[in-house]
Image (cartoon, grey):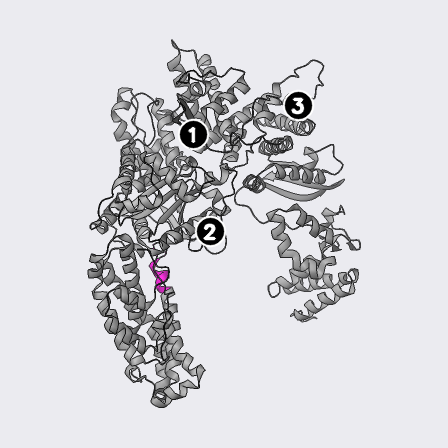
């Protein structure tokens, strides 16, 4: 049974088993409103006394019978619909019970139409409409409903407003009756006061009582209203979402266990809890990483509907949302609510926050008799496929069995399907397919499934940074995972130390205590990084021996990877290695691993095949790839590079007798760190480089390797820039300055590059994909150089970047166009949002200052048209105009870009009605120059909010500029100004 999107009062009564003749009698009392709502007809006459009695009798009976109906429900979907029906009933019943208790001068039983009034209504449609409006309110399908993401107080506040509207329409109806007119004015006034002010509040209190009654019959009502009785204190830490099983298992007692493929999928999901959080087989001796079931801690979270100003990618959007600690209760509510069958739940978190682990643990904890969790790692399925095909791919990967989606759902009986779509950010960032409508397509899939009787809940995970790059379907709820608080970190450390007490003691090491971690709390607050801290310390208590300065994220990655590489290379050596030799070997290992990271990064996906990796390493290192023979593939360069590292995952399949292997990093941040590490190493090495030929000019830098690696994908993701910023700060200031100047020279030189180094290095997203155009590679390389220069210098001018150009600002503009043409939309967005540009002047003319943006992007500063047209700052000369306003519009049209077209669409009325004003410019001595169109819009759109003095100044500038535009434009502007006359008196 599918969940209905809209449930009327009559639907609800019928679902709850009310007697059909009694429902029909109520319909007659409401003038046929119940039937009209579903396509029927009635006489249109509202008999409030009869309706009141029917609502009270039917409603109370329905509430008393909820438990009986739920006991007969077949499956989760039918149970959810019955609960929805019960809630619809108590909303209406609460108002009538409150009305019953009010002491009104006119008793509700007396509010009936006389025969004369009934006849009069035939010819008085406005009077008839009063009763019909009240009846329609009673049978409305849009009554406020609780939801687990909303505080119950917000629901009751919305409900009070709904009751106020209902009470107002009831009062309108009553005031049109003869019995009302027969009352004294004082009695009528008292009745108005009671109905308008007392009745809505009393109805809310009745609703709360009825809601509590339903919560005793069905615990879902408590889940939806976040009214669970928490036995835990606020500081208690809960583990592995055990509360989800505890809360939902009882609701699935009557459901039959899953069969066939559904049963195989349930076994696959449950097995996850017994596996380690990380594979530490290559970690320090004696270290045991606990299982997910032992180690996963329920995170704190914030949750709200994705509506209103801003978006979930910005911190300000979350500021007013309280932090919650009841994740199992919230998930129990979300997965049993009808609303979540219409739009997905979007789970957001920083890298390493535990989004993917949450989906694995939730899939394991949902009772298999009542739910069918299907986890779909989006990085592992074909991005271009439809969602149903992706689900079926994931099921086959997890179980080894082929099953269509409808067959899978049928094999689960009455269990509710729960899709866990993990890694939406990777879908956005690593594929060539445009996926900004992915969440909308998911909601569309949910609607189709509900129509087919397979109502499905969907949870989608993503990094916070890309959360605003997708269109949000109506009703989408966003949940953000919060960092660990100190109590959670302490609890995690206790579990870690208990699991490793024997191994640490045998090696003479101390447990990892809070005091050693507290200095690194910013890192320890993310579960993945906390695990890395623990692994790092498990080698030789490095955190306990550390200095006063806490590690930042990049330093932790460096320490962990370096110590791990040294330990592994030491194991492979026949004897003990000297420190220098160990350091050299470890660095070589990390550089080889960094090339693997580039193989992934430059293909703009999260994995690389062993064959592709062998080709890359051969092209860059000059080694021959291993030849395949027979049915077995010899150990290639890829296996040598990756076989020893716990943070690299290997997957394989057999095709035509050949083993086909792919590699991906355990977490994307490992690869991002290694890419940035090698990029900075290669660029820094240019400082000591010498020309390859003695005849080469001294100022030519051999940047072939840098160009090869850095011309396929930008380094502009937030995480990469954070890593790079940390690494750059460790370079001495003098060296940073020298390197920045050198890279600015490289930026100039690479524009004339005509040869292609390392021609065999051709990373492509798909084997059949064409390689990047040479111009695109030039653009990406130049953009990466700019990012590194800004990291080194903090701020740079266009004059410093392009000294050979006469107009440095124009040089910047032309290069930006090249970079933009080289990027896809996601890359361009990342790059643009990472920069801040300031327009200014210096002695010889205009200038641009470019810097890396810190924090959330602010609105760009206003444009001074003096700067655009190369006039001096504060130009006091006459205004000017240009005739090419139509050309601007056409050029925006020809560019064909979404951004240009969106702006052009908004500006089309301005071009059509005020066209010449767009390129008519007004000066202000000592201040900025502006266009006439800008000032007109500023005045009209800011009317009523501009300070009076500013409004008068803008108006004066507009009037002064009218002489420069054609008469018809002048007349239009004057009419607009007349309609928005200056409200401030002149003195």
Vertical placement of 556 versus 443: above or below? Answer: above
Secondary element at tag 1 = strand
User: Does any portion of residue 181 appear in the rendered image?
Assistant: no
Task: Give the residue at x 41% y 18%.
Answer: 633
The question of residue 703 being in magenta is answered with no
**545 above or below 188?**
above
Mark 2–mark 1 distance (CA, rounded to whole Å): 30 Å
The residue that mark 3 highlights is: 755
Q: Would you say 796 lies left or right of 127 here?
A: right
Residue 95 appears in the figure: yes
What secondary structure is found at the residue carrying circle 2?
A: loop
Depth-wise, is mark 3 or mark 1 nearer the camera?
3
Q: Marks 3 and 1: CB-CB under 8 Å? A: no
Q: Are marks 3 and 2 in contact (CB under 8 Å)?
A: no
Which residue is at 42% across, 79% downward?
A: 129
- Asked whether 547 or 384 is in front, the reply is 384
State the residue position of label 2.
Answer: 472
Q: CA distance from mark 3 to mark 2?
A: 46 Å
Determine which quarter of the picture holds residue 489. top left
Please name the residue that numbered disc 1 is placed on: 665
Relative side of 599 to 485, left or right: right
Q: How many marks?
A: 3
* Disc 3 packing (10 Å; few <14; some 14–19; many ≥20): few
Q: Magenta segment range?
A: 145-157
């Amino acid at each position: 049974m599918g969940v209905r999107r809209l449930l009327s009062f009559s639907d609800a009564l019928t679902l709850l088993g009310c007697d059909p003749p009694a429902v029909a009698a109520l319909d007659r009392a409401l003038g046929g409103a119940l039937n009209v709502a579903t396509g029927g007809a009635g006489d249109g006459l509202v008999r409030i006394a009869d309706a009141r009695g029917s609502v009270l009798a039917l409603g109370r009976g329905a509430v008393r019978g909820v438990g009986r109906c739920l006991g007969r429900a077949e499956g989760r979907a039918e149970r959810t619909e019955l609960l929805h029906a019960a809630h619809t009933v108590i909303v209406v019943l609460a108002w009538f019970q409150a009305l019953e208790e009010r002491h009104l001068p006119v008793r509700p039983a007396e509010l009936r139409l006389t025969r004369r009034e009934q006849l009069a209504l035939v010819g008085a449609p406005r009077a008839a409409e009063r009763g019909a409006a009240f009846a329609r309110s009673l049978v409305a399908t849009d009554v406020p409903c609780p939801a687990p993401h909303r505080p119950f107080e917000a629901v009751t506040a919305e409900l009070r407003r709904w009751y106020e509207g209902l009470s107002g329409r009831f009062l309108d109806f009553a005031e049109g009756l003869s019995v009302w007119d027969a009352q004294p004015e004082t009695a009528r006034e008292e009745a108005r006061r009671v109905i308008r002010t007392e009745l809505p509040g009393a109805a809310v209190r009745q609703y709360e009582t009825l809601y509590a009654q339903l919560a005793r019959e069905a615990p879902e009502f408590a889940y939806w209203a976040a009214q669970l009785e928490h036995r835990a204190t606020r500081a208690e830490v809960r583990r592995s979402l055990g509360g989800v099983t505890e809360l939902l298992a009882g609701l699935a007692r009557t459901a039959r266990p899953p069969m066939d493929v559904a049963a195989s999928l349930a076994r696959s999901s449950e097995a996850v809890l017994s596996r380690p959080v990380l594979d530490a087989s290559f970690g320090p001796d004696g270290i045991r990483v606990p299982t997910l079931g032992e180690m996963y801690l329920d995170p704190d979270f914030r949750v709200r509907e994705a509506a209103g100003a801003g978006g979930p990618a910005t911190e300000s959007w979350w500021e007013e949302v309280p932090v919650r600690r009841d994740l199992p209760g919230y998930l129990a509510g979300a997965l049993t609510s009808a609303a979540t069958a219409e739009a997905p739940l979007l789970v957001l978190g920083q890298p390493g926050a535990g989004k993917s682990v949450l989906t694995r643990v939730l899939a394991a904890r949902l009772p298999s008799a009542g739910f069918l969790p299907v986890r779909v790692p989006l990085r592992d399925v074909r991005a271009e496929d439809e969602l149903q095909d992706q689900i079926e791919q994931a099921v086959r990967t997890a179980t080894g069995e082929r099953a269509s989606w409808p067959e899978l759902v049928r094999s689960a009986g009455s269990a509710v399907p729960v899709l866990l779509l993990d890694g939406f950010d990777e879908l956005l960032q690593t594929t060539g397919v445009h996926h900004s409508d992915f969440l909308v397509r998911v909601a569309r899939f949910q609607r189709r499934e509900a129509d087919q009787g397979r109502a499905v809940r969907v949870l989608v995970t993503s990094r916070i940074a890309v959360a605003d790059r997708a269109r949000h379907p109506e009703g989408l709820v966003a949940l953000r995972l919060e960092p660990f608080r100190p109590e959670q970190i302490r609890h995690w450390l206790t579990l870690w130390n208990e699991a490793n007490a024997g191994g640490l003691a045998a090696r003479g090491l101390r447990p990892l205590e809070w005091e050693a971690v507290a200095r690194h709390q910013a890192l320890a607050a993310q579960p993945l990084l906390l695990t890395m801290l623990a692994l790092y310390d498990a080698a030789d208590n490095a955190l306990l021996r550390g200095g006063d300065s806490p590690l930042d994220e990049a330093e932790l990655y460096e320490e962990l990877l370096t110590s791990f590489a040294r330990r592994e290379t030491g194991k492979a050596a026949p004897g003990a290695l000297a420190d220098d030799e160990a350091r050299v070997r470890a660095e070589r290992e990390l550089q080889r691993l960094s090339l693997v990271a580039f193989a992934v990064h430059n293909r703009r996906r999260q994995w690389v095949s062993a064959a592709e990796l062998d080709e890359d390493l051969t092209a860059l290192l000059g080694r021959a790839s291993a030849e395949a023979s027979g049915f077995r593939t010899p150990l290639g360069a890829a296996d040598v590079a990756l076989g020893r590292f716990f943070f690299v995952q290997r997957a394989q399949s057999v095709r035509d007798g050949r083993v086909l292997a792919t590699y991906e990093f355990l977490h994307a941040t490992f690869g991002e760190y290694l890419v940035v590490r090698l990029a900075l190493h290669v660029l820094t090495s240019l400082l000591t480089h010498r020309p390859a030929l003695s005849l080469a000019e001294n100022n030519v830098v051999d940047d072939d390797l840098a160009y090869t690696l850095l011309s396929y994908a930008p380094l502009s993701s937030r995480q990469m820039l954070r890593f790079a910023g940390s690494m750059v700060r460790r370079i001495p200031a003098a060296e940073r300055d020298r390197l920045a100047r050198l890279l600015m020279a490289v930026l100039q030189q690479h524009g004339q590059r005509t040869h292609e180094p390392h021609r065999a290095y051709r990373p492509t997203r798909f084997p059949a994909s064409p390689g990047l155009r040479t111009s695109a590679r030039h653009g990406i390389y130049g953009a990466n150089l700019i990012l590194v220069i800004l990291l080194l210098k903090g701020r740079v001018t266009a004059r410093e970047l392009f000294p050979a150009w006469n107009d440095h600002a124009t040089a910047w503009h032309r290069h930006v166009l090249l970079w933009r043409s080289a990027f896809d939309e996601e890359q361009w967005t990342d790059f643009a949002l990472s920069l801040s540009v300031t327009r200014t002047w210096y002695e010889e003319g205009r200038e641009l200052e470019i810097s890396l943006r810190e924090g959330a992007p602010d609105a760009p500063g206003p444009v001074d048209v003096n700067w655009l047209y190369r006039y001096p700052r504060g130009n006091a000369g006459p205004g000017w105009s240009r005739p090419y306003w139509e050309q601007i519009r056409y050029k925006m049209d020809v560019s064909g870009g979404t951004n240009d077209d969106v702006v052009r669409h908004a500006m089309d009325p301005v071009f059509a009605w005020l066209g010449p004003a767009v390129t008519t410019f007004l000066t202000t001595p000592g201040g900025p120059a502006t266009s006439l169109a800008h000032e007109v819009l500023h005045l009209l759109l800011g009317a009523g909010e501009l300070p009076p003095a500013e409004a008068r100044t803008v108006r004066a500038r507009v009037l002064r500029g009218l002489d420069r535009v054609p008469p018809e434009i002048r007349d239009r502007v004057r009419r607009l100004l007349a309609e928005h006359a200056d409200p401030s008196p002149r003195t």
